[in-house]
Structures are given as C-alpha cells and as structure tokens.
C-alpha cells in the first residue's frame, strides 16, 4: 500500500514498523528483556507439549505437495534432481532446542539498545485456516452440529505507535456488551505478535496465565498474515471442547491502531 504523504506529515507514527511498536511497549510498560524471553520460552514449551500430546491433530488438515530435491546417489554437481512427495501435518515453528540461555544470546533486531529479538517475536510463516459461521436455522436445516455460539465481538481504536495494546479496550468493550466478566472466560487466545505486546496487555488486564494461550502462540507457532482470527478460533474451539469450558475468547491487535475481541459459548 502506498503511504499517504499527508498522513505521514501529520502523524508519522502511523507508519512505524511493528518491531518498533513492540519496543515502545517494552519501554512504556517497563517490560524487561528477561520477561520477554521467559514468555517466548513458555510459548515454545506449551506448543511442543500440545504437539506431542496430539492436541492439534483434530484442527489440522495435512497438506501433501511435490518438491524437487537433489537426486539420491547422483554425482556431485550433476544437477540431477528427483521429485518427492512431502506431507506437512504439524507446525514447524516450535524449537525443541530453545532455552532461556539461547534466547538471551540473541541480539535486538529493531533497535540497537532494544530488547525485542527474533526469539521473542513471532516468526514469519505460511498458514491458512477456515471457520464456518452460520445462523442456527441454517445449521438445523442441514444437520450441522455447531461447535459454539458466537456470542459477540467488539473492535476498538488505539494509538498506532502502541497498537499492540488494542486487545485491552476491545476485551473491555465486548465484556460489557455481553454482560460477562473476565472471570467468566475459561480460555483466551491472544495473538502473540511479540512477547512485549502480550505482556503490555497483561499489565492492563490480569488474565490468568493458566487460561491464556494454553497451547502456545505465534511466538512459537508462527503468525501467518491475515490468518489470526480464524486460526485462533479453530484452536480455541478445540480446546474449549476438550476442557468443557463454557466461554472462550479470541482477541488480537491489528497494525495501524486497532484491537478486536470475540466471545464464544461452547454448545
């Protein structure tokens, strides 16, 4: 998207990079490098535990594709290649070799004296997700068994240079709209664009860590662009059914200065 020259002149922070926004949150909320790395490590540990326990199996459709690779046994430098079928059935992002010590060695990537690193940021990844939303009548007519009822959603605007805090006003707004409290929400999926961004939200809204991103998040699993809402909803609904939780929430920040939050009731 071409930048708007007039907007750049009047409000340059609109075009601030997401990494520098994470640095802003770390500075504004007093979030240390150690806190960010600790959160990142937990994300990897939870994601790996979920993978090992098969908790993602029911929400992932394996994808098989063909890829050309150097031919086995071919002469070095011959350029001979063979086609193999590869099936991807689980996330490739979580690192089993991640540790607090390894994360602490990484350099800041957005500011020379910053605290945001590749290790405590979400990684670039490919992904897709789908969620079918219908009316109750449509589901009945077609014999569909709903997983949950979409109770309500809200969006909110925040300063672009601190857009990571967007979930906070969105959560407060949707809770007011639905007549629920944070204590009523048994599970929360909050997008992990950066550890600093999530921790900034937790400074404002003390969400129980045992209810938040219980199977890890984007710091470990990746953050496919434009996929957040559907992917987190699929994960949330599966875990709600597994734990027999009544209410769950998906919430996210949105680049440019927005937050969104939606509440689901298990059926």
Image (spheres, grey):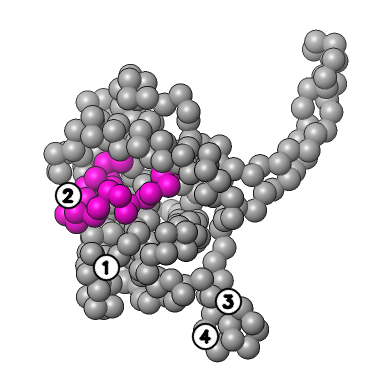
Disc 4 marks which residue? 136
Q: Which residue is drawn at 52% across and 84% down?
A: 135
Query: CA separation, marks 1 and 4?
Result: 24 Å
Quarter holding the N terminus is: bottom left
Residue under circle 1?
184
Is label 1 in contact with label 4 (beta carbons under 8 Å)?
no
- Graded by Cα atoms within 10 Å as few (under 14), some (14 to 19) or many (20 or more), the crowding at tag 3 reads few
Earlier residue among tags 2 and 4? 4
**SS assignment at label 2:** helix
Q: Residue furthest top?
A: 76
- For the question of whether residue 57 can be seen, the reply is yes
User: Would you say the residues marked 1 and 2 are in contact, meaning their CB atoms lie under 8 Å apart?
Assistant: no
Give the alpha-carbon distance from disc 2 to disc 4, as whole Å: 38 Å
Tell me: 233 left or right of 59: left
- The Cα–Cα distance between marks 2 and 3, rounded to whole angstroms, is 38 Å
Marks 3 and 4, Cα distance to the nearest angstrom? 10 Å
- The secondary element bearing badge 4 is classed as helix
Q: Distance between the residues labelled 1 and 3?
A: 24 Å
Depth order, front residue of 28/92: 92
Picture disc at residue 203: 2
- Decide which of tag 1 and tag 4 comes sooner along the chain: 4
- Placement of 186 over or under 75, stated as above or below: below
Say which residue appears at 53% left-offset and 75% top-offset: 146
In this figure, which residue is indicated by the disc labeled 3? Answer: 145
């Amino acid at each position: 998207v071409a930048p708007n020259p007039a907007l750049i002149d009047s409000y340059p922070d609109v075009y601030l990079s997401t990494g520098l926004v994470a640095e802003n949150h770390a500075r504004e909320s007093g979030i240390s490098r150690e806190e960010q790395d600790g959160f990142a490590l937990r994300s990897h540990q939870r994601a790996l535990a979920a993978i090992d326990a098969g908790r993602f199996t029911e929400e992932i459709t394996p994808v098989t594709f063909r890829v050309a690779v150097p031919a086995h046994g071919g002469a070095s430098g011959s350029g001979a290649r063979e086609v193999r079928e590869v099936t991807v059935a689980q996330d490739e992002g979580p690192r089993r070799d991640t540790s607090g010590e390894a994360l602490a060695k990484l350099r800041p990537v957005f500011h020379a004296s910053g605290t945001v690193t590749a290790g405590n940021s979400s990684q670039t990844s490919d992904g897709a997700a789908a969620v079918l939303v219908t009316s109750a009548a449509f589901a009945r007519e077609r014999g569909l068994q709903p997983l949950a009822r979409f109770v309500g959603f809200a969006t909110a605007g925040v300063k672009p240079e601190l857009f990571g805090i967007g979930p906070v006003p969105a959560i407060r707004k949707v809770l007011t709209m639905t007549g629920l409290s944070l204590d009523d929400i048994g599970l929360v999926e909050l997008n992990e664009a950066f550890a600093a961004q999530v921790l900034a939200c937790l400074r404002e809204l003390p969400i129980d860590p045992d209810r938040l991103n219980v199977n890890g998040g984007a710091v470990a699993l990746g953050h496919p662009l434009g996929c957040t809402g559907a992917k987190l909803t699929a994960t949330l609904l599966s875990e709600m059914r597994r734990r027999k939780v009544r209410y769950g929430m998906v919430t996210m920040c949105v680049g440019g200065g927005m937050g969104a939050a939606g509440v689901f009731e298990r059926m």
